[in-house]
Each structure stands twice: as C-alpha cells, then as structure tokens.
Image (spheres, rainbow, N blue to C red):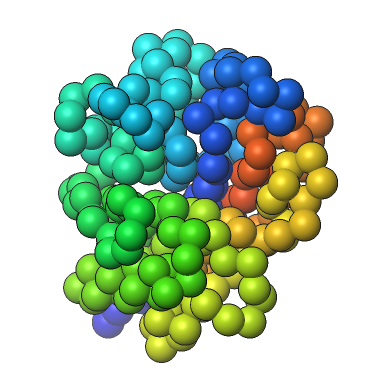
Amino acid sequence: MKHMTHTQIRIASYNIHKARGVDRRHDPERILQVINGLDADIIVLQEADKRLGQRLPAIQPELIDSETDFRLVDVSANGISLGWHGNAVLVRPGVNVAGVTRLELPGLEPRGALRIDLDIGAGLSVVGTHLGLRRRNRLAQLQTLCDATQDSAHTVIAGDFNEWSERAGLEPLADRFETHSPGRSFHARRPMAALDRFALSAGVEMRDAGVEQGPLAKRASDHLPIWSDISVPHVKATD
C-alpha cells in the first residue's frame, strides 16, 4: 500500500538590481539582511551579476558565506559570476541539489534560466528566470521553460516575469502550471506592478505567499522580494 505525504518548504524570488538600492547605493550587506529576513529554504535571485564584461558578481561569494546561512549553488559558466545570465540560487544547509541545468532563452536580448533539481518529496525542479522586456520574447521564453521541464515530476518557476498584465502574456503556462502573483513588487518605493511571480505545476500546492515590504526591502533594490510556502508530495510505502 502507498501513503501520500507532503513536505512544506519556502521558496523566495528577489531581483536584487545588482545590489543597488533606490537610493543608488551599492550595498550588498543590505541585500543580504533582506535575504536573511525571508526565512526561506531556497531563494532564486535575478540581476545577481553585472551585465557587461566578465559579468562580475554584485555580491562577493565570501560575503554570502560570512553573512548568511545559505549556500550558493554553483551555476556559473565562467567561474566568476554568481549566476547564469544574472540568475543565481541560494539554498539552506540540508537542501540537496541533485542537478543543475543552464537554459538559454530565445529573444533579442541575451536571457537565460536555471533549472535546479532537488531531492525534496517525489522530486522538485525549481526554475529561476528573468524574462525579457518584449511580450513576444517572453511568450517564447515561457514555452522554452515548459519544454525544458516536461520530465520533471514537480516544478516551480520563479522569478521576474516582467509581465505587467494580470490577464495576458502567460498563455504557454496555462496547460501545466498555475501562476501566482503574491502582490505588487515593483517599484519598491511605490509598488504598482506584480512583475515577480511563481508558477506551480500539478501536485505542488501553494499554502501561503506574500511580498516582503519592510523598510529595508523598500530601499535595498527596485524590486521587493516575494515568497511562497509550497507543499510537495511524496509517496511512502506502508504495510
């Protein structure tokens, strides 16, 4: 006989704007204070690296080690950047990463995504992404993410979707995913748009979600971080 149980974890997504706040100060320590306050198990970051040249990290890895309890998942293709096309992933100790896949996304701008396969429940893939500025490109990018996760038992796509509309622009997700917008996350000083979102595949349940709106988060980046408490199923054999 099989018995269905669930594991609950918290995933957060944060566009850190290269650690430059609304006051135009480059302050990595401030970003890390916000991250520490999210109480998340997994955090996907956008704009974690500078866009030009060698794509230097916006936050030094040594600072992440010393100022947080998180581990930076090794996704860099050049040995310098924190992430891939600015997407980086932090995990708590005890979260086992079984695989990492870098995904190139179509469009005029150079964009990418990360698929992180985790030993959670019956298996969970977390995709961190920062979609393009043009809707035509975003639709193609979302289709690419759908195609790249067909083999995953359970998937969460998280990141800056760059979609201002609440009704259009997410059509490629409709068949397999339920998209959640925890609230308005941009612009941090006066939030007016829900650009940052989660998309959950069948079997993954949203238990709670929100936007971090504390005074530090309102200064640290031009986006506010979002979080979600999700439940991932797994099956145990019983007598």
At 28% from the left and 70% from the top, the residue drawn is: 144
Q: Position of residue 191 (x, y in %)?
A: 77, 51
At 67% from the left and 23% from the top, the residue drawn is: 24
Task: Work out whether 90 lies above or below 57.
Answer: below
Q: Position of residue 173 (x, y in %)?
A: 43, 79
Q: Nearer the viewer, residue 217 or 188?
A: 188
181 vs 5, left or right, is right
Seen as rendered, the residue at the extreme front is 108
Quarter of the image with the N terminus is bottom left
Q: Position of residue 100 (x, y in %)?
A: 21, 48
Task: Work out whether 100 lies above or below 73.
Answer: below
Q: Position of residue 42 (x, y in %)?
A: 45, 43
Task: Work out whether 225 lies above or below 127.
Answer: above
Quarter of the image with the C terminus is bottom left
Visible residue check, residue 232: no
Q: Image quarter for residue 238? A: bottom left
At 40% from the left and 16% from the top, the residue drawn is: 60
229 vs 61, left or right, is right
At 39% from the left and 69% from the top, the residue drawn is: 137
* Count of number-bearing discs: 0
Task: Work out whether 235 lies above or below 88.
Answer: below
Q: Nearer the viewer, residue 165 or 156?
A: 165
Visible residue check, residue 29: yes
134 vs 217, left or right, is left
193 vs 225, left or right, is right
Q: Nearer the viewer, residue 115 or 133?
A: 133
